[in-house]
């Protein structure tokens, strides 16, 4: 294949959905695999749907994922700049005129209210209104009006749009690299607006014109654009560009975990997973939607997750690096059917990346989390590398995300303020206070303190008081960590150190003596 040019062409109408990131990723993989170029084009011709902040969000999301375009908004201009359609506004009108001159488009003057009235009256008679070969002659346009009338309307500054004149009774064929041959009758298409009264092209015209001008060879996009593809084929034909028309590949929908319909933000809210790569604050409502980055996913675990939504490497393995994806990617292997999103598998994939992180790397990020969240000074003994690496060793198998090293392991860094009430209610006896006080003293007096020594001291004191270790073990954990469960107890005691452990136990004992524990 001679070096392809592909593009990701989002409209800045909100945050990028993970389906959008997948489209960007497949474009990127295809470009890299075939030594081509990957372009980011911002399609912002629909000014009514413009959302402030969305463009920056798209750029930041692509940067975070590490799928940087070779040309495009936010990534440095290439030979076909500008790459934002609103900055290309002056360019499109001539193509609308060219289509009119060739008899493939026409001016239409219908007011929004008239179109609405038509729609209503058709609906009342049980059918849907379509602006097409059957209806266009009864509408207000340059085909139904005389040349004189059209001239007058234009001269008086009447608002108009340009519509594509879809022929009746023809078929449009296209070969989609994912879906195979697609054949559509033009009778199913309507005379789409190409150019609007605000002087802006619509998506259809701008998209085709820009793909042509930017020498795009393959259009890889979501399945929701498949119904527009025949219209785009007609535009290429009528503009005389059919010989350089890009190949199409429409990617399958992302489906809800139960397979029932398209994955939406609401599914994420309901089932507790993000659908956006980064946190997004809606500029109108202020509502914050959570993102994979802030949840603690890594760019490479996130890319691995979305890559598998509709594509698999040949050996079906589930952990695939970006380089392997580039090696293996092919559009022919993208599945036709919708890709079910599986939140559990998503976490599992991330977990594999988390587990592969060297302890030193996790310790370093734990260090920065501790300083950010709790302001621990660099000289604090809990910030010492040796301490943090041991903390990571203890916690690593119990968590899946870096931030959980703190969220689920806070007791390694701070003495508890509260003590698990369920355990106290079930197991605490007033006569244990003396045993634990003795144990705290023995811990702090031990001359060679480590996990094994701590365990032996514990067992011997329990035996002296005729108590089975099982009666006291979980209580010991609660006194030290506040929690009913957690990392291995005696290694934790070794890590915290004899004095810290003894202090925590004494503090807990004095708190408990002033508590009323229901029995
Ligand atoms: N602007 C369209 C979108 O928002 C692009 C569709 C295409 O890639 O042609 O998805």
Image: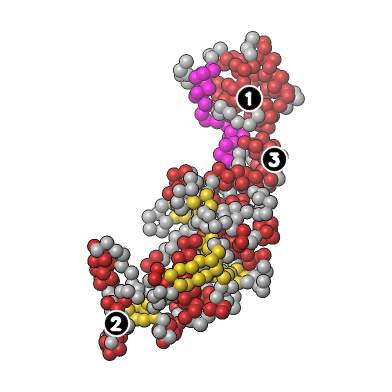
Residue 432: name its quadrant.
top right
Residue 123: name its quadrant.
bottom left
The magenta stretch spans which residues?
404-428
From this viewpoint, is residue 364 visible?
no
What residue would you read off at disc 1? 502
Q: Nearer the viewer, residue 506 or 211?
A: 211
Residues at marks 3 and 1, CA–CA distance in whole angstroms: 23 Å
Label 3 vs 2, first from the N-terminus: 2
Q: Is residue 316 above or below residue 163?
A: above
Asked if the beta carbon under badge 2 is closer than 8 A to the nearest atom of ligand 1, the reply is no
In the image, 265: left or right of 361?
Answer: left
Q: Nearer the viewer, residue 127 or 258?
A: 127
Asked if the beta carbon under badge 1 is closer than 8 A to the nearest atom of ligand 1, the reply is no
Label 1 vs 2, first from the N-terminus: 2
Residue found at x 33% / y 69%: 130
Choose mark 3 or mark 2, whichever is in front: 2
Q: Secondary structure at mark 2?
A: loop
Q: Residue furthest right?
A: 448
Question: In the rendered structure, are the residues bearing label 3 and label 2 in contact, judged by CB atoms less than 8 Å apart?
Answer: no
Mark drawn on residue 144: 2
Q: Nearer the viewer, residue 39 or 446?
A: 39
- Residue 60 image position (x, y, % from top left): 54, 61
- Residue 402 image position (x, y, % from top left): 61, 44
Q: Secondary structure at mark 1?
A: helix
Label 3 vs 1, first from the N-terminus: 3
Q: Is residue 159 above or below residue 124?
A: below
- Magenta stretch containing residue 418, yes or no? yes
What residue would you read off at disc 3? 389
- Magenta stretch containing residue 450, yes or no? no
């Amino acid at each position: 294949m001679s070096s392809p040019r592909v593009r990701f062409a989002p409209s800045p109408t909100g945050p990028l959905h993970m389906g959008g990131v997948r489209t960007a990723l497949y474009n990127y993989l295809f470009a890299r695999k075939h030594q081509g170029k990957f372009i980011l084009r911002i399609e912002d011709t629909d000014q009514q749907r413009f959302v402030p902040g969305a463009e920056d969000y798209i750029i930041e999301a692509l940067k975070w994922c590490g799928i940087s375009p070779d040309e495009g908004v936010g990534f440095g201009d290439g030979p076909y700049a500008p790459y934002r359609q609103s900055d290309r506004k002056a360019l499109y009108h001539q193509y609308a005129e060219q289509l009119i001159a060739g008899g493939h488009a026409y001016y239409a003057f219908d007011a929004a209210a008239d179109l609405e009235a038509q729609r209503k009256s058709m609906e009342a008679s049980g059918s849907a209104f379509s602006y097409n070969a059957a209806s266009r002659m009864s509408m207000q346009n340059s085909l139904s009006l005389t040349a004189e009338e059209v001239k007058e309307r234009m001269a008086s500054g009447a608002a108009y749009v340009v519509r594509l004149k879809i022929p009746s009774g023809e078929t449009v064929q296209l070969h989609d690299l994912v879906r195979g041959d697609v054949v559509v009758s033009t009778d199913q298409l309507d005379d789409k607006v190409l150019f609007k009264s605000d002087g802006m092209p619509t998506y259809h015209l701008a998209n085709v014109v820009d793909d042509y001008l930017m020498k795009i060879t393959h259009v890889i996009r979501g399945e929701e654009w498949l119904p527009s593809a025949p219209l785009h084929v007609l535009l290429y034909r009528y503009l005389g560009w059919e010989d350089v028309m890009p190949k199409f590949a429409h990617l399958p929908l992302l489906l809800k975990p139960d397979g029932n319909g398209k994955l939406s933000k609401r599914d994420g809210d309901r089932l507790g997973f993000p659908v956006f790569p980064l946190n997004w604050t809606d500029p109108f409502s202020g509502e914050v939607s959570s993102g994979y980055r802030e949840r603690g996913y890594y760019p490479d675990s996130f890319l691995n997750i979305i890559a598998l939504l509709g594509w698999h490497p040949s050996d079906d393995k589930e952990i695939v690096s970006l380089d392997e994806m580039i090696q293996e990617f092919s559009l022919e292997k993208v599945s036709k059917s919708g890709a079910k999103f599986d939140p559990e598998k998503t976490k599992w994939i991330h977990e594999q990346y988390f587990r592969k992180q060297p302890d030193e790397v996790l310790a370093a990020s734990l260090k920065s989390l501790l300083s950010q969240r709790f302001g621990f000074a660099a000289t604090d003994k809990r910030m010492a590398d040796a301490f943090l690496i041991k903390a990571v060793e203890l916690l690593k198998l119990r968590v899946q995300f870096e931030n959980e090293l703190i969220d689920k392991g806070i007791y390694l860094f701070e003495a508890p303020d509260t003590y698990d009430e369920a355990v106290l209610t079930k197991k605490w006896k007033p006569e244990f206070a003396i045993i634990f006080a003795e144990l705290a003293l023995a811990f702090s007096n031990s001359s060679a303190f480590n996990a094994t020594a701590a365990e032996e001291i514990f067992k011997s004191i329990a035996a002296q008081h005729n108590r089975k270790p099982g009666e006291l073990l979980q209580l010991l954990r609660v006194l030290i960590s506040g929690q009913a469960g957690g990392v291995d107890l005696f290694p934790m005691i070794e890590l915290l150190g004899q004095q810290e452990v003894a202090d925590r136990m004494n503090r807990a004992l004095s708190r408990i003596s002033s508590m009323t524990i229901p029995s």
